[in-house]
Image (tube, rainbow, N blue to C red):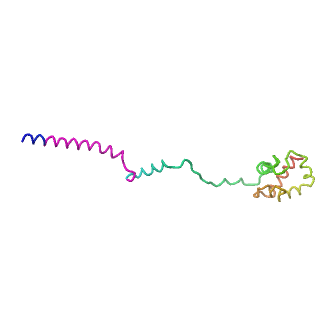
Amino acid sequence: MAEQHSSKGIMWKTIGVAVVLIAIIYPLTNKSFKSAADSGAGNDEAEMRIQPVAQFELAKAAPAASGPKDGASIYNTVCGACHNTGAAGAPKVDDKGAWAPRVAQGKEALYKSALNGKNAMPAKGGAGDLSDAEIKATVDYILTKVK
């Protein structure tokens, strides 16, 4: 009978040690191995890891400055692209010989050409949002350069 008592004691001690080990090891393994289905934060982390490298957003352009623009700024932003380089047959601003016959026709003829377009130049130089007064101010600015 003594043998049975000692084997029962060993069995209970082994079970006790196993329970203590399970009680220590289970919480450690349970925290580090949560499944994605059980964890709401796991889904957020996965979404963060698979984000695209870049994103593209369209935004509205800032509204244009209110009030009329002066001839110099319009020339530099619209007209200068062709009249500084001579692109599409446009007379260069610094070429007084090319401007002489145009200036001889008078301001009204130059205003009409600028407002309605001439040869490769579209009406208002392609900037349809400009007023007639702004175009005339730009022609006046060009005339100060070519005379």
Q: Is residue 12 left or right of residue 21?
A: left
Task: Give 31 or 86, whichever is nearer the viewer.
Answer: 86
- Does 14 sit above or below residue 47? above
Q: Nearer the viewer, residue 19 or 129?
A: 19
Q: Report whether 76 appears left or right of 38.
A: right
Q: Is residue 21 magenta?
A: yes
Q: Report the magenta stretch's main SS.
A: helix
In this rendered view, identify the residue nearer to me: 14 or 61. Answer: 14
Please provide percent x and percent y for residue 66.
Answer: 72, 54
Image side of residue 64 versus residue 21, left or right:
right
Is residue 58 toward the left or the right of residue 24 in the image? right
What's drawn in magenta, residue-wise? Answer: 8-37
The extreme left residue here reads 1
For image coordinates 47% across by 51% down, the residue present is 47
Q: Which quadrant does the N terminus fall into?
A: top left
Q: Is residue 72 magenta?
A: no
Residue drawn 89% across and 55% down? 107
Percent x, y for residue 10?
A: 15, 40
Which residue is at 80% across, 57% downward?
A: 122
View extreme (bottom): residue: 116
